[in-house]
Image (cartoon, grey):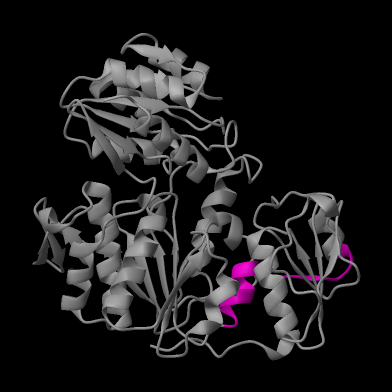
Amino acid sequence: MSGAHADTERWRGARVAVWGAARSGIAAANALVELGATVVLSDTRARDQLDLTGLSPQVEVVGGGNVVAGAQFVVPSPGIPPTAPVFEAARAAGATLVGEVEFAAGLAEAPLVAITGTDGKSTTTEMIGAVCRAAGRPTVVGGNIGVPLSQDVRTVGADGVVVAEISAFQLWSCGWFRPQVAIVTNVAPDHTDYFAGDWDAYVAAKARVLQDQQPGDTAVLRGDDPLVAAMATRPGVARVTFGPRPEFDWGWDGTSLLRRGVAVLASDSLTVKGRHNVCNALATLATGEALGLPLEATLTALRDFRGLPHRMEHIRTRHGVVFIDDSKATNPHAARVGLCSLTTPYVAIVGGYDKGLEQAELVEELVAHARAVVVIGGTAARTEAEIAGRVRTVVAQTMAEAVETAAAEARSGDAVVLSPAASSFDLYRDYHQRGQIFQAAVKALSE
């Protein structure tokens, strides 16, 4: 399987407006300059508030608003929602919209593996990167996982693999985006505020990852998710299903991961635990097969895979209580999945920026299995009201207070889990910072 021919000539001599001076904007601007484009990088923040470290001196910078500035192409930040008026201004000026991941994918010589979905995409992305490296393939891992795709996509040739986590924020603005392998992990409510409350637009953005695939490409789809299973693929694209039942192409019988009904790996040999990680491993196995990777190398890498920071990450055991950081659970569905993977009672620290997401199933999980719940942040009052006294609930004002309260509520043999079920933007820069502050508070607890 080979990648598409690198798309470089269209940028030579072109004038391109890049919107947003964060990591992906700077990476795209630098790559465009290297390709011979004239680039204007603009941001809604004032110019003196921008961190332009690493930006090519050939890039013109404008602060105080996003500008078209006579550009033929506009590469927007994924943080700008589709309803922003600036997009209408770009269309009126005749500029062509090119998503950052679309731009980056057009530069790839290696096959592109794109992973999207509401939950599990970061872990699956890193798993796939690990198995590609274990098979001896030069590998770049990037996209929504933290490294802009346009930064490193050209560092591997046709013998390598580009593995990219792709969010709905990045997909909707793509005019052409063809991954040779596309994985959709699931679709659950999240980020509909970005799409102005339009659930259908959110689902369509996820399905966009399949739209431009060509005959010979592979779509790896969660078989037990009705929204994913219903997503259309083009004729000639191989549809491969995975999920936690034995009837899928890559399935699970409760004890073993199965390839078309035949056991290939005992699930208890995975270092990362939980049914959700079984599904992530199944998607990885399906991708390895599509890429032609040796099965044994894939299995070895999966056994050795240790998981991601802030995703059910064990931090410390104190007085028989295990402290777990699941700060990456930024919606109720992801939080519930993490909590359901536990086999012990737990005290959960829940709360964050309120995106207005439905959390009834999470609340029922908390009522059924939590010893206590500590609520914090923007969703605290709503979560406390929905629990309605059915399990002990305590309100905390700071993360340090939440950790101290949870530790006092827990008993030996329990877990204390930071399980926010919400974004971090009420109190923190991002979920990484939230997790780091949780971990610092846990480590500060006295013996």
Foreground residue, 93 or 64? 64
Q: How many marks?
A: 0
Name the residue furthest top: 389
Image point (17%, 30%), residue name: 344
Q: Residue at x 37, y 13 (%)?
A: 393
In the image, is residue 94 part of the stretch drawn in magenta? yes
- Kindly tell me whether residue 242 is visible in this rendering: no
Position of 80 compared to 13: left or right? left
Q: Nearer the viewer, residue 213 or 49?
A: 49
310, 295: nearer the viewer: 310
Q: Position of residue 88 (x, y in %)?
A: 83, 57
Residue 114 lies in what quarter of the image? bottom left
Residue 432 lies, in percent from the top left, at: 49, 45
| Image vertical order of residue 30 relative to residue 263, above or below | below
User: In which quadrant is the C terminus drawn?
Assistant: top left
From the viewer's perspective, is residue 428 above or below residue 366?
Answer: below
**Vertical relation: 332 (above or below) 48:** above
Is 237 situated left or right of 397 in this image?
left
Q: Can the viewer see residue 90 in this picture?
A: yes
Name the quadrant of the N terminus.
Answer: bottom left
Q: Magenta segment, which residues?
A: 92-107
User: x, y (%) of residue 101?
Assistant: 59, 69
